[in-house]
Structure formats: structure tokens, C-alpha cells
Image (tube, grey):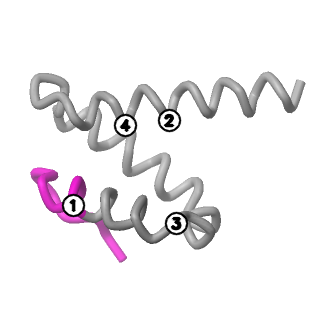
Amino acid sequence: MDNKVNELNAVLLDRLMSDLHDDTKCTPGLYQVIRGIINDNRADLDSLPKEALRELQNISEKAPFQFGS
């Protein structure tokens, strides 16, 4: 079961990243979902490569709101 959940999580993250690169899909609802994913996985963010963190930072700067610290 864990394997299926991990697979689903990977697909979800891929789709969300794809949607973030599509201006027509960048809605407040999408940003809210992304914010929830980030908050739920904050501990895992420390293990991301620096390039991925920079990409996330660039994307978050385009959001119509600021992420809390």
C-alpha cells in the first residue's frame, strides 16, 4: 500500500509542477494546494537539490500571496 501512496504522491507532484508552469492554471486554488503540500512536506524540503529549491522560490515569488514562515 505504501508503494501505491508513494506513486500517487509522485504523480501528484509532477502534475502540480506542470500546472505551475502553465499561466492558465495558476489560480489561487492551485497555490493553496501547493502551499499545503509544502507545509505537509517541509521536513523533506531540506533534502531537495539547490536547483529545485531555487525553482520553487522563483515560482513562489509569482504567487499572488506570500508564504508564511
Q: Are marks 2 and 4 in contact (CB under 8 Å)?
A: yes
Mark 3 Cα-neighbour bin, 10 Å: few <14, some 14–19, many ≥20: few
Q: Which mark is residue 49?
A: 3
Tell me the kind of residue under disc 3.
Pro
- Reply yes or no: does residue 26 show up in magenta: no
Tell me the kind of residue under disc 1.
Asn
Q: Residue 31's spot in the image, x, y percent?
A: 27, 42
Tell me the kind of residue under disc 4.
Met
Kindly identify which residue carries mark 2.
Answer: 13
**Relative to the observer, which residue lies in front, 61 or 54?**
54
Q: Picture quarter containing residue 54?
A: bottom left
Q: Residue 29's spot in the image, x, y percent?
A: 26, 33
Q: CA distance from mark 2 to mark 4?
A: 6 Å
Per the rendered image, the range of residues in magenta is: 58-69
Mark toward the start of the polypeptide (1 vs 2): 2
Relative side of 44 to 35, left or right = right
